[in-house]
Image (spheres, helix red, strand yellow):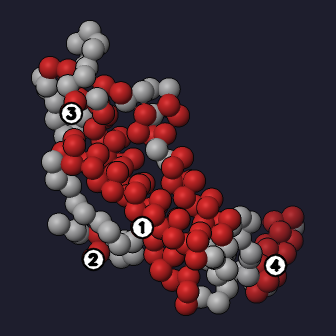
Amino acid sequence: SVLLVWMISFTFNACKESNLDLQPKAETEASFFKDDYQFFRAIVGTYAKMTDIFWFNNNEPRHYVWILPGDDLTTRGGYAFESFNGLNQSEGGLNDLWIAYYRIISRTNVILEKIEEAPNDPEVKITEETSEWVKGEALFLRSLMYYKLWNMWGTAPLINKRIKDLASSKTP
């Protein structure tokens, strides 16, 4: 009988349309990028992602990887990077850097897209000064990440637009 009551109450409550129309509990992209402060927060969040390059979040610094191209390694030879012995594309440190660089590039592409859309969106209240400043910061960060990619790998996929579908994810 308890099971029957539970099933009946579940059936009536599950069919309410108000249960399907939920509001987000946090900011979403649709509610963000509406004013100067939110664009400022977006660019600061992109700079904050740079901590992944040094990997302080995980208490496992990646210095031995990003110092490699300059030949500035001064450790005891415990890493494959120091002698180039056994270095391959599946090396965890290289993979972490690749991902961090492209996450920063992705964030800058979103910011640049939102800045371009801002003049045509009446809900967005961003000053021209903030727009130019944030755009400059985003372009700087994106170019810095491409420089770092070039410094480590020589060439890397150039992604200067936000990837929105699978077809645009295959870039040269």
Helix, strand or loop at label 2? It is helix
Q: Residues within 10 Å of mark 4 (few under 14, many from 20)?
A: few
The residue type indicated by label 1 comes to Asn
| Alpha carbons under labels 1 and 2: distance apart | 17 Å
- Name the residue: 30% across, 33% down: 66
The residue type indicated by label 3 comes to Pro
Q: Which residue is mark 4?
A: 13
Dots 1, 3 in contact, CB < 8 A: no
Which quarter of the rendered picture does the C terminus lie within?
A: bottom left
In the image shown, does 108 or 7 lie closer to the viewer? Answer: 108
Instruction: Tell me the quarter of the picture where residue 32 sits.
Output: bottom right
Dots 4, 3 in contact, CB < 8 A: no
| Alpha carbons under labels 1 and 3: distance apart | 27 Å
Helix, strand or loop at label 1? It is helix
Q: Which residue is mark 3?
A: 69
Q: Is residue 136 visible?
A: yes
| Alpha carbons under labels 4 and 2: distance apart | 41 Å
Of tags 3 and 2, which is closer to the observer?
Answer: 3
Q: Which label belongs to residue 109?
A: 1
In the image shown, does 51 or 115 lie closer to the viewer? Answer: 115
The percent coordinates of residue 134 (x first, y second) are: 53, 65
Q: Which residue is mark 2?
A: 167
Nearer the N terminus, badge 1 or badge 2? 1
